[in-house]
Amino acid sequence: MSTREAKIAQSETRIFKAVFPNTTNHYDTLFGGTAMQLMDEVAFITATRFSRQRMVTVSSDRIDFTKPIPAATIVELVGKVTYLGNTSLKVRVDIFVEQMYSDEREKAVSGEFTFVALDENKKPVRILE
């Protein structure tokens, strides 16, 4: 395994959350905006753990909501670096939904976020490997 592959593996980030009624819409499913906020947070943590530099979100690529996320479920968000440029990197975030009282689990949402490393003057800087 190369140093880059090892860093990517080490920076993979997993966060679990319970879906409570205060985060759901009138269909009793997780608000899409809440899902996107959680995804951006996990992507930010992943990017920062990989680079150990100041990172900012510059874009989110297509976000696919393939399954609804009902209230009273558990979600796992998994972030992984998928691309590394000179000053930017991409992080893919998948959300898996789990039933609380069974082993049922499926992917519900996927998206990719692009981050840029900044120096103390908020100018793009090379990502250190």
Image (cartoon, rainbow, N blue to C red):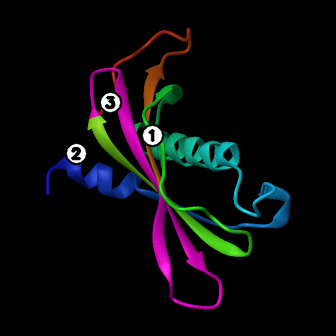
Question: Residue at image x 55%, y 49%?
Answer: 42
What kind of residue is marked 2? Arg
Q: Position of residue 23 (x, y in %)?
A: 79, 56
> Is most of the magenta stretch helix, strand or loop?
strand
Q: Relative to residue 67, is residue 72 depicted above or below?
A: below
Packing grade of label 1 (10 A; few <14, some 14-19, many >=20) is: many
Packing grade of label 2 (10 A; few <14, some 14-19, many >=20) is: few
Distance of label 1 from label 2 (alpha carbons): 13 Å
Judged from the image, the secondary structure of the residue bearing numbered disc 2 is helix
Q: Which mark is residue 4?
A: 2
Q: Does the residue at mark 1 contact the one at mark 3 (Cβ under 8 Å)?
A: no
Position of 114 with respect to 95 (left or right) is: left
Distance of label 3 from label 2 (alpha carbons): 11 Å
Q: Does the residue at mark 3 contact the one at mark 2 (Cβ under 8 Å)?
A: no
Q: Position of residue 17 (x, y in %)?
A: 67, 66
Magenta extent: 84-108
Q: Quadrant of the rendered structure where residue 24 is?
A: bottom right
Question: Residue at image x 50%, y 84%?
Answer: 104
Q: Position of residue 91 (x, y in %)?
A: 40, 42
Query: Is 74 colored magenta in this rendering?
Result: no
Q: Which residue is mark 1?
A: 47
Q: Position of residue 31 (x, y in %)?
A: 71, 51
Q: Which mark is residue 128?
A: 3
What kind of residue is marked 1? Ala
Mark found first going from the N terminus, 1 or 2: 2
